[in-house]
Image (cartoon, rainbow, N blue to C red):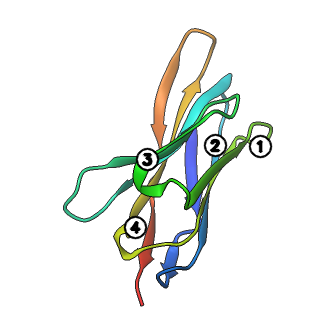
Amino acid sequence: QVQLVESGGGLVQPGGSLRLSCAASGSFFSITDMGWYRQAPGKERELVAKITDDHNTNYADFVKGRFTISRDNAKNTVDLQMNSLKPEDTAVYYCNADIWSSRWYGMDYWGKGTLVTVSS
């Protein structure tokens, strides 16, 4: 069974840093896009950053210059380094990945989420 498991959330003061990690486990053929989304209370889930299997990245405007997404294809992991955190970054952060069980069949997978709270 394919799973995405996040780690690294927690409480941090404004201006601080956190690093989120996500690992894919189980049996699969390949992973193409991986990314991070977030959902704040009362708001819809939104894209934070995405990275392709050849390491092309895409960031939401509100995190450009502060967050960095990276991945390790050999380990099937994706990380999100978050710097200069603001209270408005408080949200549950979800890992997402397009995981293919064969060359012809892929599915969109989500982790259960990890809470990031930015507060003094």
How many residues crowd around disc 2 within 10 Å: few (fewer than 14), some, or many (20 or more)?
A: many
Q: What residue would you read off at disc 2? A: 24
Instruction: Of the two numbered discs 3 and 4 on the same chain, state the one appearing first in sequence.
Output: 3
Residues packed near mark 4 inside 10 Å, few (<14), some (14 to 19) or many (20 plus): many
Amino acid type indicated by mark 4: Asp
Which residue appears at 34% of the width and 70% of the height? 88
CA distance separating discs 1 and 4 = 28 Å
Q: Tell me: 119 left or right of 59.
A: left
* Residue at 24% in and 65% down: 41
The amino acid on which the numbered mark 3 sits, given as a three-letter code, is Ala
Q: Nearer the viewer, residue 87 or 107?
A: 87
Considering the image in quadrants, where does the N terminus appear?
Answer: top right
Above or below for 40 versus 50: below
Q: Tag 2: residue type?
A: Ala
Q: Do the CB atoms of the residues marked 2 and 4 lie less than 8 Å apart?
A: no
Q: Position of residue 4 (x, y in %)?
A: 56, 46
Q: Nearer the viewer, mark 3 or mark 4?
A: 3
Determine which residue is flagged by label 4: 89
- In-image side of 47 versus 81 (left or right): left
Q: Which of disc 4 and disc 2 is earlier in sequence?
A: 2
- 3D distance between C-alphas at marks 2 and 1: 8 Å
* Disc 3, SS: loop
Residues at marks 1 and 4 touching, judged by CB atoms closer than 8 Å: no
Residues at circles 2 and 1 in contact by the CB criterion of under 8 Å? no
Mark 2 and mark 3 residues within 8 Å of each other at the beta carbon: no
Amino acid type, label 1: Lys
Kind of element beneath mark 1: loop
The answer for how far apart the CA atoms under marks 3 and 1 are is 25 Å
Where residue 36 appears, as percent x and y from the top left, is 49, 48
